[in-house]
Amino acid sequence: MTNKQETKVLNDTPSGISEACRRLKSGELVAFPTETVYGLGADARNSMAVAGIFKAKERPTFNPLIVHVESLDAALELIDLPPALKELAKRSWPGPLTLVAPIKPNTGISDLVTSGLDTLAVRVPNQQLALKLLSEFGGPLAAPSANPSGLVSPTTVEHVIDGLSGKIAAVLDGGPCSIGLESTIVGIENDVPTLLRAGGLSIEDISEISVVQSRAVGSTKILAPGQLQSHYATKAEIRLNSSAPKHNEAYLAFGNSKPDWVGLDLSPQKSTTEAAANLFAHLRSLDQTCTEQGIGTIAIAPIPDDGLGLAINDRLKRAAAPRNS
Ligand code: TXA
Ligand code: MG
């Protein structure tokens, strides 16, 4: 049974938003923009709808989902935020930060969202259309990135359609995502705020206000279940930290492109913020070029770890990981 359905593109208009809400309330899946990447939204209190996310993405069910809400107050109805995380939330929400904290009793959140854990991941996105949607919907929306599991995350409506057309009811069009990398995830371990995933909020931004251990980065221990090794898989192989492409390689440059190379530049300005915004779109488009031109490998320039560089390098390591895990 394929259940093929037409995927509707909805505009940022009152009627587009109302239709998105109506569909979400009836248990359908609607992708929506955030400042990080497009999310595949479902009513977090409707288990059938949440199950639909796993089906559409073909996602392993042990992988819990992030819930999106419109405000800190709405988040506090769902989770018990320890003071250190609450301070982070006040500083950074709305924004590209997800907080993992103990879930309160009787929230109605589907067990499929938490994968049975006693914690819940929550964030308030900093994107006007997402906030309008959340406010009109009036409840939590579960939303992982709106791409088939393991593939490159979507930063435009076209990317969402490429991956999920026919499998979801609709996508709200909010234009390209401004940040282009998933949110930074912070939890609590032994009373210390702990980085679980590097992301769109840079470590420098966080360490200003709170001690953060970055144990998850570069370690092989899976802290956020779902931090699977191979992720963001392209069809072409990936070769990291290369200052120039070899013969018959495409090149993803960082301010060091040459006109005779087949490739794209993540940031002519050598800015990790600009590179983050371009990362997924450039990976997709270069992968397509490789397929068309019979090129087997994308070589990628070294990216500095400053600002969003840490998160970019985390994504690139996963993109380069062996595909059989
Ligand atoms: O920017 C983002 O975070 C995007 C947009 C759509 O908001 N969402 C996103 O969701 O990246 P997703 O599902 O692709 O990534 C969720 C991550 C996974 O690594 C998952 O394991 C982790 O969050 N996570 C969710 N709930 C958790 C929990 N209770 N404890 C630890 N990690 C959790
Ligand atoms: Mg994802």
Image (cartoon, rainbow, N blue to C red):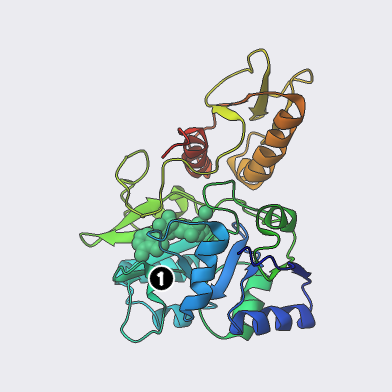
285 left or right of 77 in image: right
Q: Position of residue 10 (x, y in %)?
A: 77, 71
187 left or right of 279 in image: left
Q: Is residue 95 visible?
A: no
Above or below 165: residue 238:
above
Q: Is residue 163 visible?
A: yes
Disc 1 residue type (three-letter):
Leu
Dividing the picture into quarters, in which one does residue 5 lie?
bottom right
Which quarter of the frame holds ligand 1? Answer: bottom left
Above or below 14: residue 296:
above
223 left or right of 154 in image: left
**Residue at 61% from the left image edge and 30% from the top image edge:** 236
**Residue at 64% from the left image edge and 24% from the top image edge:** 296
Disc 1 element: helix
Circle 1 residue:
112
Q: Nearer the viewer, residue 174 or 225?
A: 225
Please identify the quadrant where the C terminus is shown: top left
Above or below 234: residue 256:
above
Seen from this angle, which residue lies furthest front? 1
Q: Nearer the viewer, residue 271 or 298?
A: 298
